[in-house]
Amino acid sequence: MKKLFIVFMALLIIGLVSCGESTTNVTTVESSVDETTQTTTEYIYDDRSLVSEDCEHLENIGDYQPVWCDEFNYEGLPDTTKWAYNTGGDGFGNNELQYYTNADPDNAYVSDGTLKITALLESYNTNDYTSARLVSKYYGEWTYGKIQVRAKLPSGVGTWPAIWMMPTSSVYGGWPYSGEIDIMEHVGKDPDNVHTTIHTGAYNHSLGTQIGYSLSGTDWESEFHVYEIEWSPGHIETFVDGVSMGVFGFNPLANPTVKVTDAWPFDIDFYLILNVAIGGFWGGPTVDDTIFPQSLEVDYVRVYQKDYAGLDREVPSEISNLSMQYNTYDSIKIIWNESEDDIMVKEYEILVDDVLKGTSSVNAFDIEDLEPNTSYKISVMAVDFAGNRSDLVTTNLTTASLSNVTDRIEAEDYDSKSGVYIGACTDGEAGECLTWISDGDYMEYSLYVPETGTYRITYRISSESDSGTIELFGLGPFPLETTVLPVTGSYDIFVDVTSEGDFSLREGVITFRIEAAEGGFYLNYFEFEKVD
């Protein structure tokens, strides 16, 4: 869940992908892929092939087949073959006030055809409230599909119910880098609105950039509504009672320097979470203790998926307009126009110099761990859910150049820095230099070392009344060398100061860190010299 809600629509909305009719077909497809002929396996499509035994009573919704469900037509604790519990009372990163219990019928119970997740005013350990948080992790996990939860929400200031999803594994890193899908959230202090949101590495509430939609109504707390998502590669759409609430989609043209998976990590397994939180950064700070007990009442949970492979009849088209969107000395970000397929493209395979580098579910990819100023053969092919591959599309792209370590490096040409300022420089020809360098300020520079050997460094500095000290860091946590700087008498008087000690560098790219152990000086440029 989120700590606060700021609607931020930075991704472009993309259209729904239409699917073919649900019929029985025998398909054999041949296609030329980089001079290799591929034939798909003969496959007879069954429009009920994915239906689980528990869900046989449910009809298909178009091509969607019911694969997982809980109708809550029993009595007692929630089904242990479908649900587990998150427990604890540490606030869950949101300053929540409740303790989530484990299999306590006072907090999670099924009766009269519905699940009740109930929050109570009840002391437990150091918490003043108890509730439950049910998770389908390890019992129900999905990549893509239609997910429906019919529910009636609790009421009262301080309640914070949610129907949401988290990734089973942190494939792209811990929260928020592997994503979060909030199908529905509601806070009792704002009773007329429900919200739907996604969180990613680039778009999340910690940065104030999460992307979401809100829907107004007057009976969220008194009537049942169906909260739903439809999720496919590069696309998530949320619904309430079958009416679209909002669309989330990947747009390669938005924020070109953002890593692809930081923008769209939604191509891995996610599981469902049902819970009622109390208080917290969004649900609080006020809690009305007169409202309890309060319950999130759930009529059913239903998950549907399509047999994309069975529906597929054709080979996807080749991509178009493969190009470089952004590059650095060790990476290239590529984008392209999407392939067309009769059903849906599952992913794109990216090859670098004819070797598979990775896959992407969207039409962009970050190629990393490359060499500077080097040309690479980049190829992309589309793959559908039946395993059919398009023809390869190939281009040659080059990484950015990197300054040689023995070049004169202008101080203001840093890759990153802390605390320094760029100002006019009076040293020789008019230009810029780093001014007012204080204790602890630093700059980082990625430079190419062409040859392993022994080096020294010379700094071009000025100072008025303080003698500064520079520490030079390379690959490790300890300085390569430390240079004490003289007082030049004026910031307009620059001198060369060469390190007293020499140090070893190995061939390759090294990110150097120049840090002011003691500040009080200006820095115009620096130069490395190989001495052995």
Image (cartoon, rainbow, N blue to C red):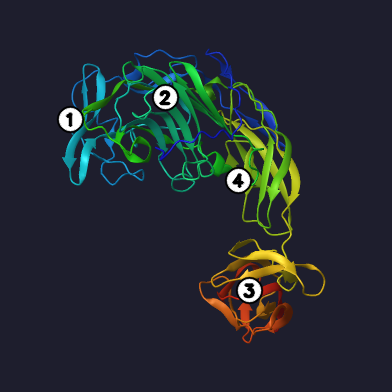
- Whether residues under marks 2 and 3 lie with C-beta atoms below 8 angstroms apart, the answer is no
Mark 2 or 3: in front is: 2
The span from disc 4 to disc 2 (Cα, nearest Å) is: 32 Å
> Of the residues under marks 2 and 3, which one precedes in the sequence?
2
Within-10-Å neighbours for mark 4: few <14, some 14–19, many 20+: some
Q: Which amino acid, mark 2?
A: Asn
Residue 304 visible in this rendered orientation of the protein:
no
- Whether residues under marks 4 and 1 lie with C-beta atoms below 8 angstroms apart, the answer is no
Q: Is residue 209 above or below residue 147?
A: below
Q: Which amino acid, mark 1?
A: Pro
Q: Mark 4 points at which residue?
A: 258
The dot on residue 193 is 2
Mark 4 or 2: in front is: 2
Q: Mark 3 points at which residue?
A: 506
- Picture coordinates of residue 325 (x, y %)? 70, 44
Within-10-Å neighbours for mark 2: few <14, some 14–19, many 20+: some
Location of the C terminus by quadrant is bottom right
